Image: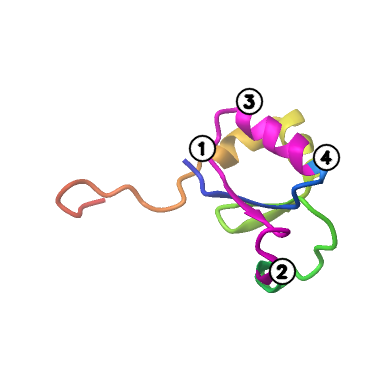
């Protein structure tokens, strides 16, 4: 399963809407609440300099944008393949790919 990270603010309805879709799809994600952790703003600016709003969503370290972008990917059928992509190679118990 892909690594999904979402930068949010606790009072943001678009953040809630994006998380609702991810929850409905049973996608595990890492939420970074910028109200609770304001020091993470710098991290977000480095990862996506053009970001001015939340949510900002990353799938396997690729910034996909915000809530509308997430829903657009879902509506066009492009989100599921992104979420099914592995974020790292699968290795068996003996360290073999």
Q: Name the residue under label 1.
A: 84
- Precedes in sequence: disc 1 or disc 2: 2
Q: Name the residue under label 2.
A: 41
Would you say 89 lies left or right of 54 here? left
Q: Does the stretch in magenta take in 14?
A: no
Instruction: Report if the CB atoms under discs 2 and 4 are less than 8 Å apart.
Output: no
Instruction: Report if the CB atoms under discs 4 and 3 are less than 8 Å apart.
Output: no
Marks 1 and 3, how far apart at CA:
15 Å
| Whole-percent x, y for residue 44 in the image | 69, 66
- Precedes in sequence: disc 1 or disc 4: 4
Residues in magenta, as a range = 15-39
Q: Is mark 4 on a helix, strand or loop?
A: helix
Of all residues, the one furthest to the top in this rendering is: 24
The way the protein has been coloured in the rendering is rainbow
| Whole-percent x, y for residue 42 in the image | 69, 74
- Precedes in sequence: disc 1 or disc 3: 3
- Precedes in sequence: disc 4 or disc 3: 4
Marks 1 and 4, how far apart at CA:
26 Å
Q: Name the residue under label 4.
A: 13
Q: Is mark 1 on a helix, strand or loop?
A: helix
């Amino acid at each position: 399963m892909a690594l999904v990270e979402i930068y949010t603010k606790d009072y943001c309805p678009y953040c809630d809407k994006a998380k609702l879709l991810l929850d409905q799809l049973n996608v595990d994600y890492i939420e970074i609440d910028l109200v609770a952790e304001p020091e993470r703003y710098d991290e977000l600016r480095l990862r996506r300099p053009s970001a001015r709003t939340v949510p900002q969503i990353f799938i396997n370290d690729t910034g996909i944008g915000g809530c509308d972008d997430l829903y657009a990917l879902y509506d066009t059928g492009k989100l599921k393949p992104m979420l099914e992509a592995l974020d790292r190679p699968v290795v068996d118990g003996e360290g073999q790919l």
